[in-house]
Image: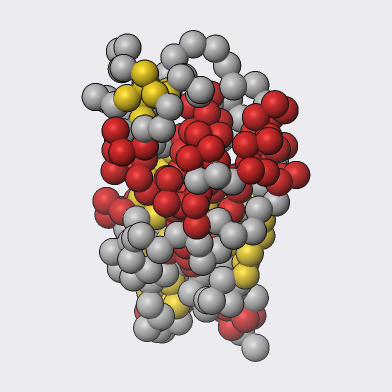
Amino acid sequence: MSKIQKLLDKTPEKALITAYYLRQKEVSRQLAQSYVDSGWLERIHNGVYKRKNVELSWYGAVYSLQRQLNLPVHVSGESALKIHNIFHHVTMDQINEPIFLEGPPKTQIPHWFERLFLKRVYYRRSSVLPANIGIDSMMIPDGFKIDVSSPERALLEVLIQVTDDHRFDDASNLTDSFRTWNFDLLLELLQSCKSYKAKRLLMFFGYFHNIEPLMHLADQIDLGKGKIQVVTRGKYNAKYQITVPHSYVKDSEENPF
């Protein structure tokens, strides 16, 4: 069996193959080019290849970031929730769906990833949530594992990004759609989370949708002090000191902002 056959046998079919990975396997640039010329590989961007005649998959690209380049990035937010079959607001069509990824503040992803998937990539560098809590290695339909936020972490990642009425509605519906909670993990994440907005929003949605176990977590976490403007032209919720869209008003005061 040739070197390229052995290498491909150890690589998931839809995974991209990076030049760095090839060098690690003692495949020179010249040898890689010969694999292209002979039809084993197809060069799709500087420093990255895929199998000939295999469909480009963003899951496969993420696999290569994580397993070949060893980057500490994970599938986050809405993308993670769709993998968990929880969030269905955005199409599951891989050609058009946005791709949400997250990594530590100093970790950059290669330009080829964003170039290959055009304007669909939303990569957020953040330390708001701890890097070692609530990230699972999940088997996906393409037949390999990638690192994905747990549902509880992904929900918080969505809440961190709420800035307008539309996202507020999505986050509310998402929270209400959860049927199985890992409250121990959620509490651990909330106690480590640096976003008071996300924590207060989650408590508010628990209150609004009457999710009692969620509301009971409030006494065990730091919700911060002072008022937070989540949406503009909203109404003020005194219980959690945040602004909310008018349709979410229960016990509210006039908007003081």
The reply to whether residue 54 is in sight is yes
Tell me what residue is drawn at x 42 percent, y 51 percent: 173
Q: Taking 49 as reference, is 139 left or right?
A: right
Q: Taking 44 as reference, is 110 left or right?
A: right
Query: Percent from the top left, x then y, of residue 61?
Result: 46, 62
Name the quadrant containing residue 213: top right
- Residue that lies at the very extreme toward the front in this rendered image: 251
Q: Is residue 24 above or below residue 168?
A: below
Tell me what residue is drawn at x 38 percent, y 77 percent: 55
- Residue that lies at the very extreme toward the left in this rendered image: 233
Please state the total of marks drawn on the protein image. Answer: 0
- Residue that lies at the very extreme toward the right in this rendered image: 184
Query: Percent from the top left, x then y, of residue 45?
Result: 34, 60
Front-lying residue, 178 or 126: 178
The reply to whether residue 128 is in sight is no
Front-lying residue, 135 or 198: 198
Q: Is residue 19 above or below residue 185?
A: below
Applied colour scheme: secondary structure
Query: Percent from the top left, x then y, of residue 118?
Result: 27, 54
Location of the C terminus by quadrant is top left
Location of the N terminus by quadrant is bottom right
Name the quadrant containing residue 153: top right
Tell me what residue is drawn at x 55 percent, y 34 percent: 203
Front-lying residue, 71 or 168: 168
Query: Percent from the top left, x then y, of residue 10?
Result: 64, 76
Tell me what residue is drawn at x 29 percent, y 26 percent: 234
